[in-house]
Image: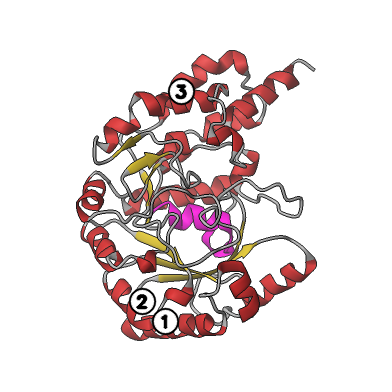
Amino acid sequence: MYDINFIHKADVLKKELMQGRITSKDIVKIEEQLESLRSHKPHVFNIETTNHCNMTCIMCPRTSLMTRDIDWIDDNTFANVLDQMTPHTPESMEAFWQFINTEYGINFDEHSENAFYFYVVSRCVILHGYGEPLVDKNIVNRVQACTDRNIPTYFSCVPANLSVKRAESIMEAGLTVLKCSIDALDDSNAKRIRGKYNNFEKAYQTIKDVIAMRDAKGYKTLIVPTMIELNENVDNRSMQQEFLDMWKDLDVYAYVKSQDNRWYYEEDDEMTNKSHYAQQYCEYPWSSMTVMANGDVVPCTQDYNCEMKLGNVKEDSLENIWNGEKYNLLREWHLKGNFPENYKCANRCDQTKLHQIINKNSKDSLK
């Protein structure tokens, strides 16, 4: 989950920025304004319960770029993180969703990446990172621990790792959202994209069986079949529509996920970033943090090697890390663009940074 109040309260400032009314001469004022708008209580976007995975996905940096040790979060660290979290109230969520609908024209029923981000991710802690949650033997207990604290949960899995029995245990523990990634509609391409242990026919049937089990048992878990838009050629667009049609008579939230907020930067002219952030700027330094399997705290899920470590929850509280010197420097770098050499935010991320918007406004004001 992220700080919905920051997203809401910063909207006026964001509009001024995007309309070109704020330039580099306003840096000090903007820095003070952002500091006053952000919560000094941290919001945890996701907790990576493990970075172990039995897939070799072509679109994931874990396959070819991740070099850190394979790890599983220990029970004490996981509980420690949860005990420092405060879930959003139903009333605050309703107010936020009304704001999103009114200001952005995005509603839950449109089944898009942005709708999923605003209506699902906003209220859930994500229990995956660069691993497969279903290979975490303690994932049911992880979900139960969140449920016991009234923290909604969501994770994404490759359905080749799913079974009806496993799904039932997780739903019984209170999982809020289960996303199932299907990226091809035949077995050979399913294996090409995610590796030899993947499949299509079995996965599709398993998801349908899980839906039937959920409905028969009365579980409330939202099931989200999704397909990543690897590129936008005609054949893929046709396949994506076929994918959506597969679910139209079932009680699921199916959508095609564009490669926005990408896991690692790719220069591919056939892919388009459709995220709301494509025309805005990255807000993660002010809205949320990520906790990795070894306890490292990083700014966002794109940091697959923990290159931007800001602290470790085994050594300090989330609040101290969130309000500490390293996090404040990160915010300054995003605002002023003075990143250290080879810093990941500046060199390996496709999201626009705040300083880029400000610099563009400054140049435009001189024309």
Residue 167: assigned label: 2
Measuring 38% from the left and 55% from the top, which residue is drawn there?
A: 70
Of the image marks 2 and 3, the number of the one nearer the N terminus: 3
Neighbourhood count class around disc 3 (C-alpha, 10 Å): few under 14, some 14–19, many 20 upward: few
In magenta stretch: residue 73: no
Judge from the rendering whether residue 123 lies leftward or rightward of residue 226; answer left or right: left
Question: Looking at the image, is mark 1 or mark 3 nearer the viewer?
Answer: 1
Estimate the spatial distance between the alpha carbons at disc 2 and disc 3, rounded to whole Å.
Answer: 45 Å
Residue 33: assigned label: 3
Q: Main secondary structure of the magenta part?
A: helix
Residue 319 seen in render:
yes
Mark 2 lies on a secondary structure that is helix
Estimate the spatial distance between the alpha carbons at disc 1 and disc 2, rounded to whole Å.
Answer: 7 Å
Estimate the spatial distance between the alpha carbons at disc 1 and disc 3, rounded to whole Å.
Answer: 47 Å
Q: On the image, numbered disc 1 is attached to which residue?
A: 210
Q: Position of residue 305 (x, y in %)?
A: 46, 44
Measuring 35% from the left and 72% from the top, which residue is drawn there?
A: 220
Q: Position of residue 80 (x, y in %)?
A: 21, 47
Measuring 67% from the left and 70% from the top, which residue is drawn there?
A: 240
- Residue type at numbered disc 3: Gln
Judge from the rendering whether residue 197 lies leftward or rightward of residue 72; answer left or right: right
User: Up-down: is 154 above or below 199?
Assistant: above
- Residue type at numbered disc 1: Val
| Circles 1, 2 touching at the beta carbon (< 8 Å) | yes
Q: Position of residue 191 (x, y in %)?
A: 59, 74
Question: Looking at the image, is mark 2 or mark 3 nearer the viewer?
Answer: 2
Q: Position of residue 366 (x, y in %)?
A: 76, 15
Of the image marks 1 and 3, the number of the one nearer the N terminus: 3
Quarter of the figure with residue 127: bottom left
**The magenta segment:** 107-125
Neighbourhood count class around disc 1 (C-alpha, 10 Å): few under 14, some 14–19, many 20 upward: many
